[in-house]
Amino acid sequence: MSTTAFFGAVELGFIYAIFTFGIFISFRILNIPDLTTDGSFVLGAAASALCVLNGMPYLGIPASMLVGAAAGIVTALLQTKCGIQPILSGILTMTGLYSINLAVMMNKSNLPLLMMRNIFTPIEENIISRPGFRLILLIPLTLIILLILVFFFKTQLGLSIRATGDNAEMVRASSIDTDTAKIVGFALSNSLIGLGGGLVAQLQQSVDINMGAGMVVVGLASLIIGEMLIKSTSVLRGLIGAVAGAVAYRLVIAAILTTNLPASSLKLISALIVAIAIAAPTFRKKLLLREQIRRNGADHA
Amino acid sequence: MLDIHFLSKEFNKGTPDAHLALNQFSMKVTDGEFVTLLGGNGSGKSTLFNLIAGSIFPDSGTIRLEDKDITFLPEHRRALLIGRVFQNPLTGTAPNMTIEENLAISYMRGTGRSLLHRTTKQDRTFFREQLYALGLGLENRMNTRIGLLSGGQRQAITLLMATMVKPKLLLLDEHTAALDPQSAVRVTELTERIIAEGKITTIMVTHSIGTALHTGSRLMLLDGGRIAMDIQGEARQKITRQELLDSYAH
Ligand SMILES: Nc1ncnc2c1ncn2[C@@H]1O[C@H](COP(=O)(O)OP(=O)(O)O)[C@@H](O)[C@H]1O
Ligand SMILES: [Mg+2]
């Protein structure tokens, strides 16, 4: 792998780490599969692109978070106030967002941002322009968000959200409104997913209406790889795992790209990683059971 | 204090499975009273608790607590006033959160703190004292995940969580039934002590006639969603096991 490819992967890894924080919040903390992701990622990217096109790249950061949060709130309301199943709620928002995303992108399926000033331009111009220069911004940003999240999940509101995902029945018996907890959790989760999209847009200097396809699986793959590297027993460890997993995932992808495998096979590989990782414990249990049955049989013989 | 008036609840209304779980049920519980509630399976004890706590709503009737009509108040709002412990020790605590975090959640009840408040040193000292009082050595394991504790330990913590901020009413639904005999005895002792110390108004469902007779100040027997017996004072002192058993199977 070339230095450029390596640093490119690490840069993307830190952006995807922020995105994976969002996946961590819905899938692990709230314990609810949220498929809004594929839409809120593009929505964040589109909002960020608009800011870039209007010469305000930094505004792209809060803007992509805000629109992502709004998408998350819609999904949460469908779930809590309208009684629609979690998976379907996410699919509905994601589907609706496709039209909205196109509208935000001024009805173009692709928005090129080349030659436009973005949040990374000042670093390149004033500090360094070696491969990986974007990390000067991305590593601190990821760390700050990580610290804020660790802090947040220790507050009363954060504890309520965690408990809602862990044991909703107990939460209802302790004066916390689980609906509110879910709404805040989904807003937070999707704001980070939106921010991930917004940063990817500025890094890759383009937005494509289809760039969100399969992002849930990418996020899950990163999360699972992270959990293999760092056992998640607390929010802090879970988030550090998300960073490690996202960077590792991008490096794996970059490595695959150096082989003869076509780039189009990446989605398949991501899906396989997730399927195998989730299936592994089941197979391990079956193998252990078979082993035990065999041994018992031997004992009785 | 608690005033229940003509409360009725029918499940699966209008279907062949229709079942009147609570039938024009009325009762009053005064401040500081400790009611033990007996009744066969399906007699409506849990339904009564679910209605009082707001997990379900009645077809008719009213529930007043401290002169406030709470009949249709949302469950989480009522939780400010009502502490609850269920039969299943897994129900009352969040397994993947630590003892301290679980206590912090129940401590939110009625403390009126901001949503961004974090557990302070004083809170932690208070939690430690409370755990110490349980006598299970849990005060040194505040950062242990609850899921790693035994059923008895979890139930003791649930009890603590339900009473740490003194509730107006405590509902205990066979909360020792799923525990091994030793833990059951310990949690029962603990329950009696906490209720006595806090003078907490309590209704406790139990299957043990002995417990029903020897704890609390008043005994009620529920049958078919109605009160079959309601005794206290001298009458309660005098009643024998056999008389109670007889009124079960009428
Ligand atoms: N959610 C429900 N749906 C239908 N029937 C119910 C429901 N909850 C309780 N019941 C019925 O109501 C009756 C009273 O149940 P319950 O209050 O749980 O009794 P117990 O005194 O054993 O706690 C039982 O016949 C039970 O089957
Ligand atoms: Mg019951």
Image (cartoon, rainbow, N blue to C red):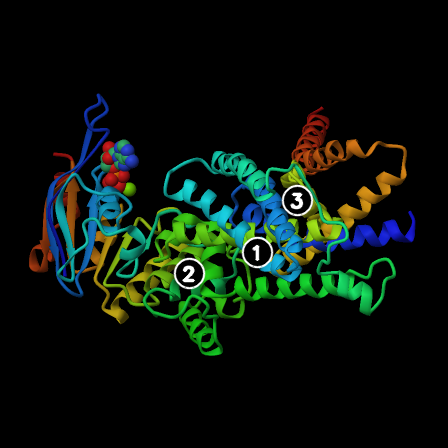
Q: Are marks 3 and 1 in contact (CB under 8 Å)?
A: no
What is the crowding at mark 1: few (fewer than 14 residues within 10 Å), some, or many (at least 20)? Answer: many
Q: Residue at x 7, y 55 (%)?
A: B235
Badge count: 3
**Residue B91 can be seen, yes or no:** no
Q: Which mark is residue A219?
A: 3
Where A151 falls versus B228 (above or below)?
below
Q: CA distance from mark 1 to mark 2?
A: 44 Å
User: Disc 3 is attached to a residue of which chain?
Assistant: A
The crowd level at tag 2 (other Cα within 10 Å; few <14, some 14-19, many 20+) is: many
Badge number at residue A63: 1
Report the residue at 23% width, 52% height from top: B73
Q: Nearer the viewer, residue B189 or B36?
A: B36
- Chain that bears disc 1: A
Where disc 3 sits, the SS reads: helix
Circles 1 and 2 on the same chain: no
Q: Residue at x 21, y 62 (%)?
A: B201
A138 shown above or below B42: below
